[in-house]
Image (cartoon, helix red, strand yellow):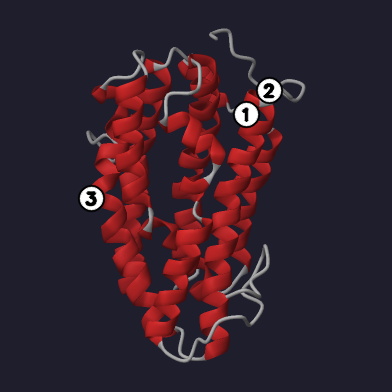
Amino acid sequence: MNGMTAFSLAGSAPLNSAEELEATLRQIGATRYHNLHPFHRLLHGGKLNKGQVQAWALNRYYYQSTIPIKDAVVISRFRDRGIRLEWRHRIEDHDGDVGTEGGIERWLKLTEGLGLDHAYVESTEGILPATRFAVEAYVHFVRDKSPLEAIASSLTELFAPNLHEERIAGMLAHYDFVNPDIMSYFSRRLTQAPRDANFALAYVRQHATTPAERELVCNALIFKTNVLWVQLDALYHAYVDGHIPPGAFVPKDK
């Protein structure tokens, strides 16, 4: 896959079967998933101060809170009731239900535990411009591309459990302001993400039936890895290199 560009496979991989598709998807994850980003290495290794961890959690909230909106758009793309039923639980996972805590509430538990004001986090007024642009691009992607590509873009969940395990262990080990209770979002996703990923993988294996369609699936995953990666680029530039854009969150804790 030497011909892969920043945005696509560019015809660099053989995609003549579902097996070759899956192998290529897993290679994309192994080389492009955001667990490899230097910011995550700092976060999980205990190299950030509290203010920098706050900045990460604040910005990531915008992504987390937009996921059910993205999933509602995915549902709107399908006439197939069975797919809508299958996809619907993703919204409930994040939004919760009557009397049931969802992922967004768990993420707010994290931001509150880190000392951020609840209303400020929910307002999203302090997030980085790149965070907003990247997350909104993801919603536009699932709205504007084919339903096959919309589902394929969720396949980063194939690689999420290992990242969550690393994050839980690393942050609990290195930060005295982190405890298991505020990390509940990640522990819950250890079971939710594999279930979701397995459905999406089976779907693209079945429905991408030509080399061209399989390449679209791979390019959708590359797009999604870029959405995740660029958010960490922005965090690193602002809160590690120190170039915080006007109006964005300025940490008080060092």
Q: What is the C-alpha distance between the residues marked 2 and 3?
A: 34 Å
- Residue shown at 37% from the left, 18% from the top: 175
- Residue shown at 49% from the left, 54% from the top: 33
Q: Is residue 137 above or below residue 242?
A: below
Residue 148: image tag: none
How many residues crowd around disc 1 within 10 Å: few (fewer than 14), some, or many (20 or more)? many
Q: Quadrant of the C terminus?
A: top right
Q: Which residue is mark 2?
A: 248
User: Which of the marked residues, 3 or 1, is nearer the chain's N terminus?
Assistant: 1
Left/right placement of residue 184 relative to residue 56 reads left
Q: Is residue 72 above or below residue 101?
A: below
- Residue shown at 68% from the left, 27% from the top: 238
Q: Given contact means CB atoms under 8 Å apart, are the residues at marks 2 and 3 in contact? A: no
Q: Which residue is mark 1?
A: 127
Which secondary structure lies at badge 3? helix
- Residue shown at 29% from the left, 32% from the top: 169
User: Which of the marked residues, 2 or 3, is nearer the chain's N terminus?
Assistant: 3
Q: Which residue is mark 3?
A: 191
Q: Amino acid at mark 2?
A: Ala
- The answer, for residue 216, to whether it is visible in the render is yes
Which secondary structure lies at badge 1? loop
Q: Given contact means CB atoms under 8 Å apart, are the residues at marks 2 and 1 in contact? A: yes
Q: Amino acid at mark 1?
A: Ile
- The answer, for residue 79, to whether it is visible in the render is no
Q: Quadrant of the N terminus?
A: bottom right
User: Splitting the image into 4 quarters, where does residue 184 fall?
Assistant: top left
Q: What is the C-alpha distance between the residues marked 2 and 1?
A: 6 Å
Closer to the camera in the image, 242 or 119 = 242
Closer to the camera in the image, 74 or 246 = 246
How far across and down, in percent of the image, does residue 54 sit? 50, 21
Q: Amino acid at mark 3?
A: Thr
